[in-house]
């Protein structure tokens, strides 16, 4: 999916009732409130050192992720009715259950590849549950279609609901790195929350670098192979075709991010 050189590089996150869009310096979000009306908000993105680490492989991915996550409480403060993807009780319960199951597997096992692979697959359960319930998958489709339409100068309704820059492309390399990293850590006698957190951050850093490499080499056979799991995940469970009303929410979020970025560029 090509992007015109004068276009802003946008990212986003689906909400349960709307869309959050990230621009270079600002964020914007639009939701469908309980009364059916559109609510829109925006603001500057927190700076956590992303510019300073931009040329440092590994560290730049973790920093950028931290900056993206730091936006979420700002969105919730500006739009209290915004439904975060992982905030419902079913998802929180699934997160607790998978954490307990993973702990039990580690206690019984010896850090084998099979055991760590099972834990990695279990860790996906809360996200899959979130996508299969409510409107998160539809708004994930809104995210992709809105951004693709902007990049291509097309109509959102006609754009694909899958996008090559989707975070689903991080899943396969991140889980692979987590499995191998946790096995290596346990073989080295490293256990406990600190070791697991270190492996987790390292897995994120590795996945972001794989993601960036795939984008730089878009169209190459290896890049296409690396993107295939993410595309299939989007197609099968990650996205759903949105309604016209849901697309209007995406249009509002997109219009707001373009407005605030234009204002920021003129200052």
Image (cartoon, rainbow, N blue to C red):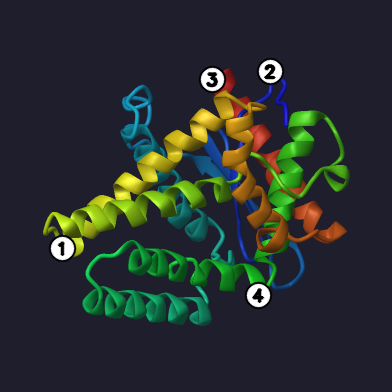
Mark 2 falls on what kind of element?
loop
Rendered image: mark on residue 133: 4
Residues at marks 4 and 2, CA–CA distance in whole angstroms: 37 Å
x then y, percent, for residue 205: 36, 41
Q: Which residue is mark 1?
A: 191
Residue shown at 80% from the left, 45% from the top: 160
The residue labelled by disc 3 is: 267
At which x and y percent is residue 221? Answer: 63, 30
| Image position of 122 (left or right of 10) | left
User: Which residue, given by chain and number where applicable, does mark 2 sit on?
Assistant: 6
Name the mark nearer the viewer: 3 or 4: 4
Tell me the element at label 1. loop
Q: The N terminus is located in which quarter?
A: top right
Residue 253 appears in the figure: yes
Q: Residue at x 51, y 54 (%)?
A: 75
Relative to 252, is 6 above or below? above
- Mark 2 or 3: in front is 2
Q: 88 left or right of 50?
A: right
- Side of 83 relative to 239 (left or right): left
Q: Nearer the viewer, mark 1 or mark 4?
A: 1
Q: For mark 3, give the secondary structure.
A: loop
**Camera-side residue: 54 or 253?**
54
Give 103 or 249, whichever is nearer the viewer: 103
Q: Secondary structure at mark 4?
A: loop
Image quarter of residue 223:
top right
Q: Nearer the viewer, mark 3 or mark 1?
A: 1
Residue at 22% from the left image edge and 70% from the top image edge: 110
Residue contact at pointers 1 and 4, CB within 8 angstroms: no
How far, Cα to Cα, is label 2 from label 1? 48 Å
Proximity of marks 2 and 3: CB atoms separated by less than 8 Å = no
Residue 29 disc label: none
């Amino acid at each position: 999916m090509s992007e015109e050189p004068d276009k802003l590089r946008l990212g986003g996150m689906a909400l349960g009732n709307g869309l959050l869009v990230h621009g270079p310096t600002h964020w914007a979000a639009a939701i469908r409130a309980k009364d059916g009306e559109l609510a829109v908000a925006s603001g500057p993105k927190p700076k956590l050192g992303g510019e300073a680490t931009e040329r440092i492989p590994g560290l730049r991915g973790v920093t950028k992720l931290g900056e993206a996550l730091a936006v979420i409480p700002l969105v919730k403060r500006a739009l209290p009715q915004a439904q975060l993807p992982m905030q419902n009780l079913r998802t929180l319960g699934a997160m607790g259950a998978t954490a307990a199951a993973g702990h039990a597997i580690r206690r019984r096992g010896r850090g084998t590849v099979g055991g760590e692979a099972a834990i990695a697959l279990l860790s996906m359960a809360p996200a899959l549950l979130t996508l299969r319930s409510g409107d998160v998958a539809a708004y994930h489709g809104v995210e992709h279609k809105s951004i693709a339409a902007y990049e291509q100068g097309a109509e959102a309704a006609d754009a694909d609901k899958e996008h090559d820059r989707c975070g689903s492309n991080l899943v396969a390399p991140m889980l692979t790195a987590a499995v191998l990293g946790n096995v290596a850590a346990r073989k080295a006698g490293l256990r406990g929350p600190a070791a697991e957190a270190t492996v987790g951050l390292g897995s994120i850093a590795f996945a972001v670098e794989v993601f960036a490499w795939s984008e730089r080499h878009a169209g190459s056979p290896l890049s296409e192979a690396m993107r295939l799991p993410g595309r299939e995940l989007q197609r099968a469970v990650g996205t759903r075709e949105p309604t016209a009303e849901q697309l209007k929410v995406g249009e509002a979020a997109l219009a707001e991010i373009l407005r605030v970025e234009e204002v920021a560029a003129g200052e």
